[in-house]
Image (spheres, rainbow, N blue to C red):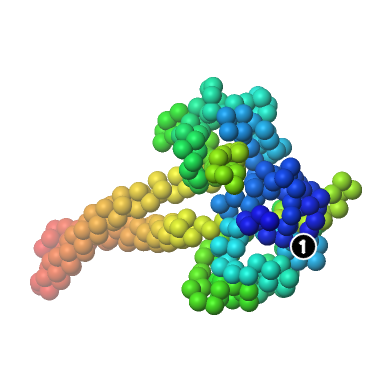
Amino acid sequence: MIVNSNQAFHLIEQFSAQAPFALWVLDPYGRSVFANVKLQETLHSMHFMPEPLGINLFHGPVAEELGLTDVCQRLLKGETIDEMVESGGDQAANIDGVGFFSLHVVAYPLLAADGRVDNYVLVINDVTPSRIAQEKLRKKINDVKTLQTAKTSRETRASELLGEITQLEKEIRTYEKKP
Amino acid sequence: MNRQLYGADDLPEAIMPLCQLIAQAPFAVWIADRTGKVVLFNEATRKLTGTEDPKKLLDSYSIFDDPIAAAQGLVPHIKRVLEGQVVQTVVILDTAREGFFCGNGCKVYYVRCLYYPITDETGVHQYIVAVIENITPQYLEDLECARVTRRIDIANNEAVTLEKEMVLAKNRVTSLKKKLASLKKAL
């Protein structure tokens, strides 16, 4: 044993409280039992103002508002989730618009020794800026195809111009040789 | 003993739910003290590193002496966590390079490491927490994006060069046409 139970309790408690990522712990019915400061900050940045501790994520409108409906449904089936969740209307059209949010969500059930669910945990990171940058890059990748098509057409035109120059130079030489 | 949280045996039942939060996390978590010695780690850490003997890791491992962290110049950055900084980085985790890791079946991963301090009530940063995620698929995708970005730059440069050459060629055609017309007129 490296740490005693008091130290372990302190460490684990502070691991959660001082984490730089949002941490949300729910009871088996979806009621919030723990939310760290970072979760409140993340929700506020999404213009979601209610205090997380008063929320039931499995019942009511909050999951839908935060784009977490599918996550909650799969969590209730016992799945462990590690994926990007996007919210804010039509994401494709609104990728850098106001109200668009991209969250990296890791969610998992905490199981008791007998296999029943004691709690559900959600670890949430707001990755909106990097998602917007990624989408811009994806659009740029599409631009490469357009550029390649344009390049082929320009190369053809350049080849025609070179042919025209050769022909003109030949004609000029013919005229210059004439007395 | 909780088999999924190493370093803290015989925990009271009352704090087990909180312990399970780390113990059952799908991402690796370890906590080191100010000397760099790991005092707690979870099952995901054991699986990621292929550690077969958790006691060996707890007895002999220090993050400040970690060969991968040292080789990648990370140790000074990790030490800054004890000054209150949060550090995030991506490193190549080659399990063959760690002394306590597996003998056979060693693996190489790209992992995202997030280090942050646990601060006591007097404001002293007492512990370093590391949260480690295996991001190999995403990282390889990012590398591909970086390659595509380079291709975009090359394609853009080529397009600019071609455009300049075409302007020169068009000017040359105009000039030759004028010269030819003038020769024809002179004859």
Extreme-top residue of the structure: A60
Give the percent coordinates (x, y) of residue B114: 65, 55
Is B149 drawn above or below residue A95 in the view shown? below
Task: Tell me which residue sits at (61%, 34%) in the image.
Answer: A26
Task: Tell me which residue sits at (48%, 43%) in the image.
Answer: A79
Q: Quadrant of the C terminus of chain B?
A: bottom left
Give the percent coordinates (x, y) of residue A42: 64, 36
Q: Residues within 10 Å of mark 1 (few under 14, many from 20)?
A: some
Q: Secondary structure at mark 1?
A: loop
Q: Is residue B182 visible?
A: no
- Between B113 and B171, which is closer to the camera in this rendering? B113
- Between A150 and B125, which is closer to the camera in this rendering? B125
Extreme-right residue of the structure: B122
Q: Which residue is mark 1?
A: A2
Give the percent coordinates (x, y) of residue B164: 35, 59
Give the amino acid at mark 1: Ile
- Between B78 and B62, which is closer to the camera in this rendering? B62
Extreme-front residue of the structure: A114
Task: Tell me which residue sits at (59%, 73%) in the image.
Answer: B101
Q: How many marks?
A: 1
Q: For this view, does B30 lie left or right of residue B133?
A: right
- Between A150 and A44, which is closer to the camera in this rendering? A44
Q: For this view, does A88 lie left or right of residue B115?
A: left
Q: Chain of mark 1?
A: A
Q: Quadrant of the N terminus of chain B?
A: bottom right
